[in-house]
Amino acid sequence: MGGELVGKIRYKKAFIEQIPVPVPTELQEKQMNELVDKIIAQKQQGDNSDGNERRIDELVYKLFEITPDEQKIIEGNLS
């Protein structure tokens, strides 16, 4: 049979491995790491502003080549 059962969904490794996952450049990775560090510091100080989280979203959208229309769909489903 193969595949792993998670909840009621069975997935097969061979299909999961075909999902394209872009690898960030060193600069993109550095930018994301810096933003994550800032977010962690903000949260520890009780600051829940989401400006840096929004910047990470934008970097991820760019990395995955997400169009503005696709962003609306994603963000509409997250609310």
Image: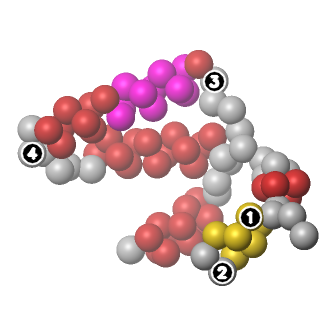
Q: Is residue 34 magenta?
A: yes
Residue at coordinates 38% horizontally, 74% vertically from top-left? 79
**Within the image, what quadrant is residue 14 found in?**
bottom right
Q: Amino acid at mark 3?
A: Thr
Q: Residues within 10 Å of mark 3 (few under 14, many from 20)?
A: few
Measured Cα–Cα span from mark 3 to mark 4? 32 Å
Q: Amino acid at mark 4?
A: Gly
Q: Residues within 10 Å of mark 4 (few under 14, many from 20)?
A: few
Q: Residues within 10 Å of mark 1 (few under 14, many from 20)?
A: few
Q: Is residue 11 magenta?
A: no
Q: Which residue matches tag 1?
A: 4
Q: Which one is earlier in the sequence, the residue at label 3 or at label 2?
A: 2
Q: Position of residue 49 (x, y in %)?
A: 20, 49
Q: Amino acid at mark 2?
A: Lys
Q: Which residue matches tag 2?
A: 8
Measured Cα–Cα span from mark 1 to mark 3? 32 Å
In the image, farthest residue toward the top: 26
Question: What is the secondary structure assignment of the residue under circle 4?
Answer: loop
Camera-side mark, 1 or 4: 1
Question: What is the secondary structure assignment of the residue under circle 3?
Answer: loop
Magenta span of residues: 27-36
Q: Which one is earlier in the sequence, the residue at label 2 or at label 4?
A: 2
Q: Which residue matches tag 4?
A: 46
Q: Are marks 1 and 3 in contact (CB under 8 Å)?
A: no
